[in-house]
């Protein structure tokens, strides 16, 4: 059984309530239909019920009957959610009028449902940008205690079993923080190790990547990676982490032992933490396209409850899999709380 199959099975065993704010989006509805058919999650669709039912009827999506459908402009908890939003955001200048409008925005409503304990996770992004999906989640759900930043990881299923964990590696941050500080980068490393352990099922060996290995060059960008490595060790003394390392020193045993002798990670890293979003985003796409790797993500990590963003070019399968991943994150968070 591969990793995704085992995640689907785990989700089926402990069904989570996953809210899909893009309830009238056709690929989302088709994925919801399959998820309900397979019993992967309880599905909450946001949108006008008559419109959702009409699209489902036309596409012959019979299982949609099993979803909970909520009209963002007209539902019984609207007052409660408006008060909750105001409570969370009034100190940031949000007025009652703004809150009563935002609560009808499905992307805000989904986060408020999670915050209020009415849903366990969210998947969106088939028709909204990353920023629009993330902003309400960052404002309402916020980070886990002790976690500085939310970041985005990819599980990379490469064609190179000699690297990582039989070819499986976790890359981060590839999706959220454009230019993390040393403290933020350390937090990304610790979250990535946690994601590798809980979702990818691998015991993390974290490489903090740079264009230098152990002092082979000097630059303030390298200093940031060294400092982040030090802070991550302080945050989690048991973590197998090392840096700064170049990508080849992180991955290839002979290069690792030559450039970073004695390192506990060099030559055998399975978690790669990139120094900036530019490096991470470009890096994962190069491995995906040139190396023909399967890239599963971005999986948002560090959030107090799981919210995941889709690419607008996503397929029905991508949405299905992302719901299964989100459900696994929700199960993991409940187990750790
Ligand atoms: N972790 C935790 N909290 C955060 C983070 C973060 N990474 N980023 C912002 N916040 C918080 C802020 O502290 C702020 O909180 P407050 O309002 O309570 O003070 C709130 O979220 C809003 O922050 P802003 O900076 O005002 O929000 P902004 O809209 O500028 O940016 C965003 C947030 C959307 C994540 C932005 O950083 C972004 O667009 N990042 C890049 C996303 C992207 O385009 N990725 C590439 C595509 S994805 C792909 O290719 C896989």
Image (cartoon, rainbow, N blue to C red):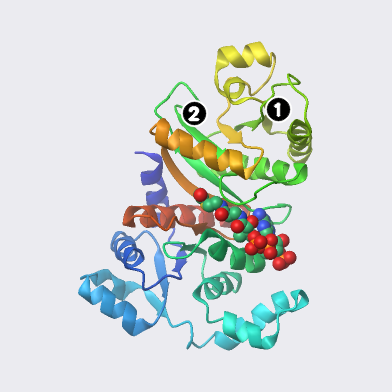
**Residue named by callout 2:** 165
**In this view, the mark in front (2 or 1):** 1
Q: Is residue 206 above or below residue 9?
A: above
Rendered location of residue 288, percent (x, y): 43, 37
| Alpha carbon distance from label 2 to label 1 | 21 Å
Q: Are marks 2 and 1 in contact (CB under 8 Å)?
A: no
Q: Looking at the image, which residue is at 51% across and 27% down?
A: 164
Q: Looking at the image, which residue is at 64% across and 45% down?
A: 191
Where does the N terminus fall, quadrant-wise? top left
Picture quadrant of ligand 1: bottom right
The answer as to whether callout 2 falls within 8 Å of ligand 1 is no
**Residue named by callout 1:** 244
Q: Is residue 148 above or below residue 262?
A: below
Q: Is residue 59 above or below residue 282?
A: below
Q: How many marks?
A: 2
- Give the left or right position of residue 22, taking residue 208 as reference: left
User: Pointer 2: residues within 10 angstroms few (<14), some, or many (20+)?
Assistant: many
State the image quarter where residue 324 is shown: bottom left
Rendered location of residue 162, percent (x, y): 46, 21
Where does the C terminus fall, quadrant-wise? bottom right
Rendered location of residue 325, percent (x, y): 46, 52
- Give the left or right position of residue 117, taking residue 45 as reference: right
Name the secondary structure under disc 2.
loop
Q: Earlier in the sequence, mark 2 or mark 1?
A: 2
Can residue 288 be seen in the rendering of this structure?
A: yes
Name the secondary structure under disc 1.
strand
Q: Nearer the viewer, residue 180 or 303?
A: 180
- Give the left or right position of residue 280, taking residue 324 as reference: right
Q: Nearer the viewer, residue 326 or 211?
A: 211
Q: Looking at the image, which residue is at 38% across and 55% down?
A: 314
State the image quarter where residue 270 is shown: top right
């Amino acid at each position: 059984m591969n990793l995704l199959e085992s995640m689907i099975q785990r989700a089926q065993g402990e069904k989570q309530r996953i809210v899909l704010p893009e309830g009238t989006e056709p690929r989302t509805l088709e994925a919801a239909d399959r998820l309900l058919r397979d019993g992967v999650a309880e599905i909450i669709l946001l949108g006008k019920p008559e419109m959702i039912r009409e699209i489902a009827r036309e596409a012959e999506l019979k299982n949609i009957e099993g979803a909970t459908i909520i009209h963002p402009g007209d539902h019984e908890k609207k007052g409660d959610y408006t008060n909750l939003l105001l409570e969370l955001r009034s100190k940031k200048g949000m007025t009652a009028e703004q809150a009563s409008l935002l609560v009808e925005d499905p992307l805000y409503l989904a986060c408020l449902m999670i915050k209020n304990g009415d849903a366990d996770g969210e998947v969106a992004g088939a028709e909204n940008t990353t920023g629009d999906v993330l902003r309400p989640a960052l404002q309402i759900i916020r980070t886990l205690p002790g976690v500085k930043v939310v970041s985005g990881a990819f599980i990379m299923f490469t064609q190179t079993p000699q690297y990582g964990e039989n070819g499986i590696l976790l890359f981060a941050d590839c999706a959220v923080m454009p230019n993390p500080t040393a403290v933020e980068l350390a937090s990304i490393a610790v979250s990535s190790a946690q994601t590798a352990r809980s979702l990818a099922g691998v015991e993390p060996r974290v490489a903090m990547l740079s264009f230098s290995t152990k002092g082979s060059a000097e630059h303030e960008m390298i200093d940031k990676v060294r400092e982040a490595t030090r802070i991550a060790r302080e945050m989690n003394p048991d973590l197998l982490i090392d840096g700064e390392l170049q990508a080849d020193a992180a991955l290839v045993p002979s290069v690792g032992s030559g450039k970073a002798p004695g390192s506990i990670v060099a030559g055998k890293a399975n978690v790669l933490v990139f120094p900036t979003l530019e490096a991470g985003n470009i890096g994962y796409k190069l491995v995906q396209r040139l190396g023909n790797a399967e890239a599963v993500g971005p999986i948002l990590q560090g959030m107090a409850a799981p919210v995941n963003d889709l690419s607008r070019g996503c397929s029905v399968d991508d949405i299905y899999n992302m719901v299964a991943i989100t459900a696994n994150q929700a199960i993991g968070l409940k187990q750790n709380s």
